[in-house]
Amino acid sequence: MRQIKQFSGHYQAIVQLIYRFFLLQLYWLGFSLLGLIVFGVFPATYSLVLLMREKSQLDAKEMFHLFWQTYRSHWKKMTQGALIWYTMFTLMCFNLLIIEHAVIRLVVWSILIYMLLALVYFLLTYRANLPVSKQIYLSFGYGFVFPKNNLVILFCTFSLYVGLHYIPGFVFFFGMSLLVFCLSKLKLQLSVEW
C-alpha cells in the first residue's frame, strides 16, 4: 500500500511538471504571436525564464497573470535588445553571403555561435535596471567567464535543433519550455552588482 502511494505521488508530480511545461509553452507561443513574432519573442522568452525560476507552484490563472505582467512591463526594453540582436545577426549572416574563402567563413560561423551563446546569456541574466547596451556588452563577457555553461548551452540548443528535425510535434508543445528549464538550472555566479 505504501509503494502505491509513493508511486502515485511521483506520478502526480511528473504529470504536474508536464502540464506546467505545456502551459508555459502555449503562453510563450501566444505572447510571441501577440508581438508579431519579431517584437514578441524576446519579452516572451524573458517571461518564460522568470516563470521557470519561480519556485512556488502556481495555478494556470496565476501563471498567466505573472506571464502577462512580466511581458508587458519588460516589452519596451526587451524589444530594444531584440532589434540590436537582430541587427548583429543579420550583419554577420550577410558576411556569410559575401565571403567565399572557407577559412574566413569558418571564423564567421564561430562568431555566430559565440553570438548565440551571448544571446542566451542576455536572456538569462537580463536586469531591468541596466541599459540594454550594457547588458549586451556583459552577455558577451559571460561567454568567456562560464566555459562549462557554454558547453551545456550548446548541447541544449543542439538538442532542440535535433528534436525539431526528428520529432517536431514534441518540440512544438514542449521545446522552448524544456530548453529554458534546462538553461535556468545553470548556476551563473554573477557577483558583480551594478
Image (cartoon, rainbow, N blue to C red):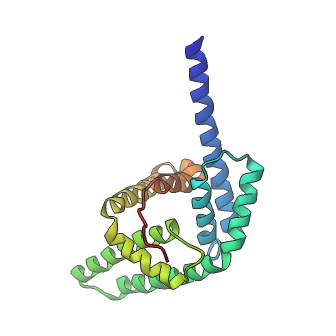
Quadrant in the picture for residue 189: bottom left
Question: From the viewer's perspective, is residue 33 above or below residue 60?
Answer: below
Q: Is residue 151 left or right of residue 75?
A: left
- Identify which residue is drawn at 50% across, 56% down: 184
From this viewpoint, is residue 86 visible? yes
Residue found at the far bottom of this picture: 98
Question: From the viewer's perspective, is residue 17 above or below residue 87?
Answer: above
All told, the count of numbered labels is 0
- Residue 114 position, x and y percent, is 36, 73
- Identify which residue is drawn at 38% across, 71% down: 142
- Residue 47 position, x and y percent, is 63, 63
- Residue 61 position, x and y percent, is 77, 51
Q: Nearer the viewer, residue 192 or 32?
A: 192
Q: Nearer the viewer, residue 102 or 20?
A: 20
Residue found at the far top of this picture: 1
Q: In which quadrant is the N terminus drawn?
A: top right
- Identify which residue is drawn at 57% across, 60% down: 49
Q: Is residue 160 left or right of residue 99?
A: right
From this viewpoint, is residue 36 visible? no
- Residue 87 position, x and y percent, is 50, 85
Q: Is residue 121 left or right of residue 65?
A: left
Question: From the viewer's perspective, is residue 51 above or below residue 18?
Answer: below
Quadrant in the picture for residue 15: top right
Question: From the viewer's perspective, is residue 117 above or below residue 178?
Answer: below
